[in-house]
Image: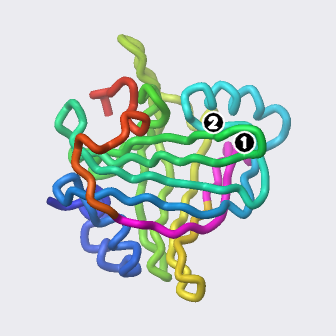
Amino acid sequence: MTSIYQEALGPDFQRLHPRLRWRFGFSSGDGVCQIGTGTMDEVWRGPWWTLPFLLVGSTRRVLFPSRGRDVPFTISNYAYRDGFGRETVTWSRRFKMRRRYRCFDATMILSRQRRLIIDYLGTHQHLAVDIHLSVDDEGGLCLRSGGQRFYEGPISFSFPMLLTGVAEVREWWDEAEQRFRISVDVRNRAFGPLFGYRGSFTVVQRPCTPDEIPLDVRPLREEIRE
């Protein structure tokens, strides 16, 4: 079974650094998971007026208002078939701030109809974000967010791009340090920076059956609409 990232990238997947191909090349058929641990050199947020937006997001594990330096970090990636039979990969991120853990969760699927990744953010998959993948000249993986849609029961609408945060994510392999590095930058086209972080981590891959996937990394509700 092919990973959703390999399908989305097509031939460009082979341009990734070998460690990136290992990291993004597993699927639910492999019976493994990957757990990353490290430190974010900086977790930042935008000006004071971004606080209400970030506070609301934190209630559903979508962004958060905390900021800090040298923040302990974990990321858990599990591949499984969701309730609709779709190949799914979790991005369950935990940041150990001074007074509490902060969470930023997402589950990703491949939209074969549109040939791109759909990133469902948060605990209830209310927010679906188009993710465009590319490979840079150093073999790093770049993710850029596109259209964003909100789903709740019969309610469904697309956000105007003026009101959304555009995310730029780059993950790459640091040969000198033998670690993965990541940079995340979320900003609004009109109002500027909203949230982001940068740092490094190592990853351990271990066997994992579907029954061993923690309930905490799965969304409380799954959304069929892409």
The residue that label 2 is drawn on is 162
User: Which numbered marker is on residue 108?
Assistant: none
Measuring from the top left, give residue 93's x and y in whole percent: 53, 48
Q: Residue, x 75% and y 41% (percent of image)? A: 66
Main SS of the magenta part reads strand
For the record, the magenta segment spans 184-205
User: For residue 149, what is the image quadrant?
Assistant: top left
Q: Quadrant of the N terminus?
A: bottom left
Left or right for 82, reference 147? left
Distance between mark 2 and mark 1 Cα atoms:
7 Å
Left or right for 214, reference 83? right
Measuring from the top left, give residue 139's x and y in whole percent: 44, 79
Quick one: SS at disc 1? loop
107 or 191: nearer the viewer: 107
Q: Residues within 10 Å of mark 2 (few under 14, many from 20)?
A: few
Q: Residue, x 78% and y 58% (percent of image)? A: 69
Q: Quadrant of the C terminus?
A: top left
Looking at this rendering, what residue extends furthest in the bottom direction?
176
Residue type at numbered disc 1: Ala
Residue 141 falls within the magenta-colored stretch: no
113 or 205: nearer the viewer: 205
Residue 31 position (above or below residue 213):
below
The residue that label 1 is drawn on is 190
Q: Residues within 10 Å of mark 1 (few under 14, many from 20)?
A: few
